[in-house]
Amino acid sequence: MFARFTTLRRIPGGVWIIGFVSLLMDVSSEMIHSLLPLFMATALGTPVVIIGLIEGIAEATALCIKIFSGVISDAIGKRKGLAVVGYGLGALSKPLFALASTAGMIFGARMIDRVGKGIRGAPRDALVADVTPPEIRGAAYGLRQALDTTGAFLGPLLAVGLMLLWDNDFRAIYWVAVIPAFLAVGLLIVGLKEPRVPVTAPRTSPIKKENLQRLGAACWWVIGLGGVFTLARFSEAFLVLRAQEVGLPLALIPLVMVAMNLVYSLTAYPFGRWSDSVSHRRLLQAGLGVLIAADVVLALSQSWAGILAGIALWGVHMGMTQGLLNAMIARTAPADLRGTAFGFFSLLSGVGLLLASAGAGLLWELWGSASTFFAGAVICLFTLVLTRFAPERA
């Protein structure tokens, strides 16, 4: 216990600022996103396959854009400005959800929001590595993820309370979500000081052939694995729709994301800290096993209790793997190419998420919800086999 708090005290202030900025933005985003599938399905009459496609395209866009922001941050040696632009776009998108009257308008708002997320993602993740000593990077990524995910469960929890208080008024809740988004941008501008990195050699394009070769086999293996892994992790909108399918009352549906993100938040830092002292490959394999269990439970359960158990397992797997994958990238990539490495990692993950979410929606429409989750379990098994071929350094 003492060692745990000693590690927390060693984590730089910049990581805490980044974490609280993420927390505020996630409160805003999840107030909207936890209700968005239901808003589209009930208020706008959007088919499930279209909801899945919109979610997949939006999330994949965010992940794919990270490659450009990551490369730019390495090329100019600056990361904070890109993060401010990204969070600013996210804040500006929030009023558009409250004003939307068609699925097309929702899609436009989601794209602006996710473009912002894509711009800020790789520079932010690289900043965490830039300011943190190597021996506690797992803990630092775990802390940032824990704070981020605290916002991700506070947002839906606030959405549930306001849905009950305001008689399912989606649009009024979306207007409230604007406030924490702009607070996040203000905190980032005022609170974060970017470290000065001495220039020891002339900067060259991060995507030149020789620089891409410098990333090394271990880094490219982690990047490739991320793409395959994401095929098994379709949009969490399907967790919300699965809860609705078993008859959870409309106003309580956001509790699905509260439960998942609460578990995620509580497990992210302990597993992140643990990753600093154990085999990354074995911890990743354990996380894949938990995701397989989550998929099977979600496919077979016909009760609220069973669905919540599956969602809790999903949260545990997120806590085990998301910060871990970031730490694996930070460990295997050269310091001056971290933004680029995070960008490529996100690009392949984005392609995987697009395919996964579109495929999940199609399977749901053709053969029912169970087929979606069973397919995820099969892809997890395949990913688990791939981890046996990991390079030693990864």
Image (cartoon, rainbow, N blue to C red):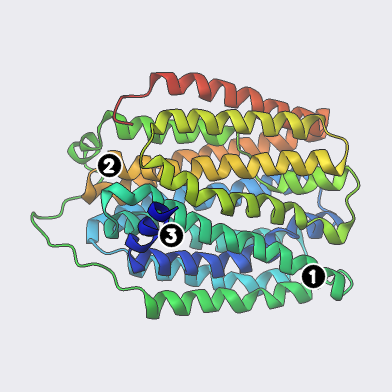
Write down the residue under mark 3.
119
Q: Position of residue 27 (x, y in %)?
A: 62, 67
Q: Amino acid at mark 3?
A: Ile
Q: Which mark is residue 295?
A: none
To which quarter of the image does residue 110 belong? bottom right
Which is in the foreground here, disc 3 or disc 1?
1
Q: Which mark is residue 333?
A: 2
Element class at badge 2: loop
Q: Amino acid at mark 2?
A: Ala
Which is in the foreground here, disc 1 or disc 2?
1
Between the C-alphas of marks 3 and 2, the distance is 20 Å
Q: Against 149, is 325 above or below?
A: above
Which is in the foreground here, disc 3 or disc 2?
2
Write down the residue under mark 1.
161
Depth check, front residue: 58 or 247: 247
- Work out which quarter of the rendered image holds the C terminus and state it: top left
Depth check, front residue: 334 or 257: 257
Marks 1 and 2, the one that precedes in the sequence = 1
The residue located at (47%, 33%) in the rendering is: 283
Depth check, front residue: 90 or 15: 15
Q: Position of residue 227 (x, y in %)?
A: 48, 34
Marks 3 and 2, the one that precedes in the sequence = 3
Q: Against 329, is 97 above or below?
A: below
Q: Is residue 104 left or right of residue 230?
A: right
Q: Is residue 350 visible?
A: no
Marks 3 and 1, the one that precedes in the sequence = 3
The residue located at (83%, 69%) in the rendering is: 163
Q: Is residue 121 left or right of residue 374?
A: left
Is disc 1 surrounded by few (<14), some (14 to 19) or many (20+) residues within 10 Å? some
